[in-house]
Amino acid sequence: MKRRLFFLLLLNVFLIGTAIASDEAPGWLMQAASLKPPVYDKDVPAVVLRNEQQTVYGSDGKLVVTETYAIRILNKDGRRLAHAAVFYLVSTGKVRDMNGWLIRPDGTTKKYEKNAILDMISDPDDVYNEGRIKSINASDDADSGAVFGYQITSEERPLFFQDTWTFQGRLPTLSSRYTLSLPAGWKASSVTFNHTDIQPQVNGSTYTWQLDNLAPIPPEPASPSVRNLAPRLTVNYFSENTAAAGPNFTGWKEVSRWVSDLHSSQVVVDDAVAGKARELTLNAKTELERIQAIAVFVQNLQYISIDIGVGYGNGIKPRASNLVLSRGYGDCKDKANLMRAMLKSLGIEAYPVAIYSGDPTYVREEWASPGQFNHCIIAIKLSAASQAATVIDHPKLGRLLIFDATDPYTPVGDLPESLQGSLALILAGDDGTLSKMPVTPPEANKLDRFTELTLDVDGNLQGVIRERSVGQAAVGERALRRLLSPPDYNKRIEQWIVNGISTARLSKISPVDKIAEGRFELDVELSAPSYAQLMQGRLMIFKPAVVSRLNSLWLTEPTRTSPIVLDPYSFTETSTIKLPVGFTVDEMPDPVSLETPFGKYSNSYQVKEGSLLFTRNMVLNSARIPADKYASVKDFFIKIRNAEQAPVVLLKK
Amino acid sequence: MKFLLRFACLACVVLFIPAYLFAGGDGPVEWRPVTQEELQMKTPKVEADADAEAIFWEVRVDDKKESKVSYDHYVRVKIFTERGREKFSKFDIPFTKGKTVEDVAARVIKPDGTIVDLAPGDIYEREIVKAGKIKVMAKSFAVPGIEPGVIVEYQYKEVFKDSWANGIRLLFQRDIPMQKAAYYVRPQKGYTMGFNYYNIPDTTLFTQDPNSKDFYVATMNNVPAFKTEPYMPPEDEVRRWAYASYRTFASALVWSNLSLGFEYLLKERVSNPSKAVKQKAAEITTGAATDEEKLRRLYDYAQKHIKNINFDRSFTPEQRDKIYDDSAEDTIKKGTGSSIQIDLLFGSLAFASGYEVGVILSGDRSENFFDREKYPFRSFVHPAAMAIKVGGKWKMFNPGTPYLPFGRLVWYEEAVNAMLIGTGYTWIRIPLTEPGGSIQRRSGKLKLSEDGTLEGTVKLEYNGHPAILRRRDEFDASASKREDTLKDDIKARMSSAEVTNISIENFDDNTKPLVYSFNIRVPNYAQKTGKRLFVQPGFFEYGVKPVFSAATRINSISFPYSWAEIDDIQIQFPAGYDLDNADSPAEVADQGKVCSLRVSMNFDKPTGLLTYRRNFYFGAGGSILFPPESYNSLKGLFDGFYKADSHVITLKQNQ
């Protein structure tokens, strides 16, 4: 927190008023400022008038990139968008030139020169990171109607001959263009995502791709990331003389071969690595137990991101396994590599797996590139004797157990939800393939809740709530338990209960983490005065869904433009509520049963031997639902909310 | 005005006194022996649930040399959990021009005694940020071999050039528990250092160090971690800390010296109005019949007709600097001024109109509960308002803050002690505005449909502090953003609510209540069973969460201000339904009349109209601070408010 504050303060200190008044704007910006954009919804904060990148690959092996950008601020909320930023790597890149201009609504201009440029580390939370950002912030000067523009020229040495270009962010964009100029004898090809294929205009060895009049992409809840909505171009460029071209990926096998080579030299099995592996697996009897023992050790190594020498491939290449072991920390690729080395010392073959963390639909098969990944996990060759839910059958490598050695909450045999179903590259040299990661079934990731409660004649409630979760449902509970100190965890549980039962007092909170089994258990004992509302001593009403009622909706807008992304979720609840003596049930809500392609929900009510038996069950499938089905998704959740708010009415005999 | 001052102070604190600092590795390092008991420690000693515990946390402050002051840190921490490991796993060491960091080292000691030293090559020096000629550098590293069970220890020295150890805060309570917290302080030769203690019962904590008579030493054992809770007093009032300062003959005259400075300011900038200022004052007040009318006009002129550069982000610091020395006459001529200049202009105009004028320096209740004996230092007060004597009584005004209405102060300048400086000075207590000064009036004309949908028109009227805060938070937001904020507020309580036709009145006119009007439609507001509808008539409290959920409490409970709410709601029920039950919740109140909630309902059967009236207030008689022992009863009251507000009535279908 202090670090964040520190950086914010620095930004504020440095960014106030570093402009020089009364400068001429360049012609391209004046021309952009003269454009008349259409009228947008009042929530659209700004419109991009021009978004252009010119990339020149020279025969000296350098890429020179010139970004030209102009934006018109449409309202006060858009002021923050009068901002220019460029990322560069210290090891292989630099920013040659950076200029910004602001044309105010009255036509006067401000130019932002060198002293207006802030040059800072790209990630304040990373200790070892060479990435930097240069920026110009004109937001304090930019009123509604102002046009801000910038031109940045930077250079870098490409690690491989590929590039990617996104034609817009969320803002509407009038003109968006990507130009690639290559030396004689070089060619380029492209693949388009999130849009029909965009063909370039070719002039000699200069290629230009362009899109105009792009509509805004409004932020919507449960939406795919904007990366998966905005038109995106990926480009390969190559020399017809292959020998001179360097890394050139025509297919996933080439990518696998290139990245595998970077990894394999780092698998160092020395005495320390082998000794540690032996020590950890001393009591392991089976292949799976040996893997689990190594996995737990590696998962619990401190995570430290290492982004030094990225321009030379160190963003992809792990540190040597023996170094990571001696330091006791590492990032995702370091952990996967150390685990691979330790398994190797035990005679178990494993392969690193390049994957994208955060959106299982992000990686596309059509573009073979290491640039599609941001995370590294591991695939472990498994004998037929070992069984696990996250095993895939590889056509050449056989049975592979997929495991994320970075996630400390997901044990062997499970995979983080954000990775399940994703396309990932198994880095096995020539045998490497882009493969679909396993998806565990809903029943392997569910929460079962059992409540045993007693309601007395005054409406007071007392009893116990037990939760049993497994798989990814347990991961959430486990993470909460581990991330919070015991007092803070208890407070969080109190808040959760009090949100459903406002007067609840918790007498006992008992969490039990069974990570080896992928399970988590929580028992809560409670009492709650006046949970049920007693009316004139004769009528008593209460909601049988005592906790985790769906109180609010997250799909509330009448219309929708982007698909709805649902994460898998499954829970059951079985409640027994002993009713107060002298009261009978006068009214019970009708049971609800909903079944859709993306999920199911049902509940039931039954009075038996003086108790109300209430059940509810829900299963949500991992789904991406088209926007035209929005009404049915919204309706599904509205019906669930209504069902969970429904009270039971008791009448005094 | 205030936020800029606070910003500047914060910037200094963060830039020059960071919490965890390391650097270098350039000097010989001596480590003290680690005991077997420390190595084998499996559980914390001070707090059972601690993730990490400092075995000792020592700081040596050395002000021996006139041109610089140094801080030597030596910390030994036992790690118990993964959370503790995460917290101590990596460090950044920022440093700027004028500061150096020296003699740094870190190491990890495992329970078996194995030592893992930080390799010098793992220290990564980088430029954190650079803008023009200003640079902030840092040395950063990850702690090797850290895991639960180990001891992490580190040392470093910060040296500040051209600084001294006067007016420094010494923290005896940090965010982890400490078995031993110690400060050693060596003052400059010839100076006497004094210590003031806060939330530390021992007022003789610092004594002469028996091992080095030049140093004072203070040690506290078994100090629990500093923890935060909702509605707790400001940190200065709860954390254990000391304030070190040099005591000179002037220390006893701190307030009179401060007063002299402001008396001079008043004389130069207020009580000596130029001809132009006098003319302007006369022009503004012409025709005003009463003192209040005159002062309102002057206030309105200063606040509305002078562009306030502190609230207009288009001004650069250079442009601001150019007008900081402007006189009242300059401010009138340019039509532009800082918050302070606008206050001084108002004072000058008032003086020119024949009023006695003073200035108020107050404490800041968001930072501490200022008392001149407890905090006898000038940095604990700030200019809060101009004081004008009207009818023999002093009244306070701050036109330099655009969203403050005539005669009001911000909440943290109420219920505080303050200096009133005119000719000489006197101490006063700025009173807390009673709940009636911060009323929210909320009304709704609503119709309930048979399917449970509630819809109609709503009006929210904010007065006093709630209006001031809304205006402060959104003074720079677009109209669309203000509407979005309102929608977000409502949807946080009623997610399915559809809010349309929003009108926001008087946002920029603080002489009037801030008013929001809109149409609302809430599907499924009422729950329906086979023959009944259940409705919460307390529409404005629907979906509000309980204020207190924790069963226990460590700190006092402190509310920023007192407030009141008056709700008038009409709900037209659907035809074919009768009230099955509409008993009103009983009044919830305390014996001391600090707070009260009264709900009354009336149902007109022929028309099917329910009228619901809710009267609530809290903090009467200046009661907004409560000791932790009263938590249970206070929570009981708020649980009672919650229950009454979420009271449900039943409609039954006619047979």
Image (tube, rainbow, N blue to C red):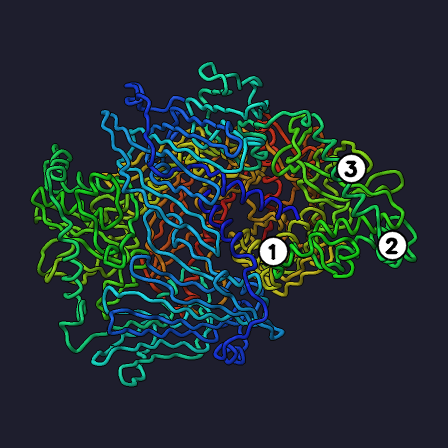
Residue at the spot x=78%, y=58% of the render?
Answer: B332
Q: Give the answer, above or below, for where A117 lies relative to A172.
A: above
For label 2, the SS is: helix
A487 sits left or right of B207 in the view: left
The disc label shown at residue A481, or none: none
**Quadrant of the rendered image containing residue A522:** top left
Chain assignment, label 2: B
Name which residue type carries label 1: Pro
Tell me the quarter of the image containing the N terminus of chain A: top left
Protein chain holding label 3: B
Q: Residues within 10 Å of mark 2 (few under 14, many from 20)?
A: some
Q: In this view, does B263 lie to the left or right of B543?
A: right
- Answer yes or no: are tags 2 and 3 on the same subunit: yes
Q: Mark 2 points at which residue?
A: B278
In percent of width and height, residue B446 lies at: 65, 58
The C terminus of chain A, quarter of image: top right
* A473 displayed left or right of B195: left
What is the spatial separation of the Cα atoms under label 1 and label 3, in whole angstroms? 30 Å
- Mark before the other along the chain sequence, 1 or 3: 1
Q: Which chain carries label 1?
A: B
Total numbered labels placed on residues in the image: 3
Mark carried by residue B421: 3
Using the image as rendered, state which of residue B296 and residue A504 is in the foreground.
Answer: B296
The mark that comes first in sequence, 2 or 3, is 2
Comes first in the chain, label 2 or label 1: 2
**Residue for badge 1:** B317
Q: Position of residue A441 (x, y in %)?
A: 25, 53
Secondary structure found at label 3: strand
Q: Distance between the residues labelled 2 and 1?
A: 31 Å
Q: Of tags 1 and 3, which is closer to the observer? A: 1
